Image: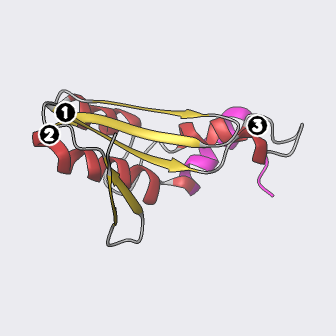
Amino acid sequence: MNFETAISRQGMPVYVFPMPHAASIALGILVFAGTRDEKWPEEAGLAHAFEHMLFQGNSRMRNSKEISGEIDSVGGNLNAFTSKEMTFYHRVVPCAAFDIGVKSLVGQVKSSLFRENIRLAEKHWGWQSR
């Protein structure tokens, strides 16, 4: 499969796999951090918890319902997974909703309400900040 590469204005590498027959576009951000980066046993599960925290709100969308609602409203879907080597956040949206997909994905990873989410996690799971 042939693909094109570019660098975004923010300095992120972008890989494009043209598929002229497709009516949708898949977008993703790959973060090279996963479970192998956890210190065992005290940090077991932290990478996966971090993945979930990024779905809890950002500077554009205050909570997970707003994040998923925006993508659902255009007929798209969103998800993420954490593995040993990486965490991958992704969206699939109709081509006409490309801008919505990009803003949603970048907002989730770049401007998460992480400090607020840490407080919620500490309360819910009894974690202690260092």
Instruction: State the residue at coordinates (73%, 34%).
Output: 45
Question: Would you say residue 13 is visible in this rendering?
Answer: yes
Precedes in sequence: disc 1 or disc 2: 1
Residue 42 image-quadrant placement: top right
* SS at mark 2 in the image: helix
Q: Quadrant of the C terminus?
A: bottom right
* SS at mark 1 in the image: strand
Prevailing secondary structure of the magenta residues: helix
Amino acid at dot 1: Ser
Amino acid at dot 2: Cys
Residue identifier under label 3: 126
Q: In this rendering, which labeled residue sits more in front, label 1 or label 3?
A: 1
Given contact means CB atoms under 8 Å apart, are the residues at marks 1 and 2 in contact? Answer: yes
Residue 20 lies in magenta, yes or no? no
Q: Using the numbered discs, state the Cα–Cα distance from disc 1 to disc 3 in whole angstroms.
A: 41 Å
Q: Which mark is residue 24?
A: 1
Precedes in sequence: disc 1 or disc 3: 1
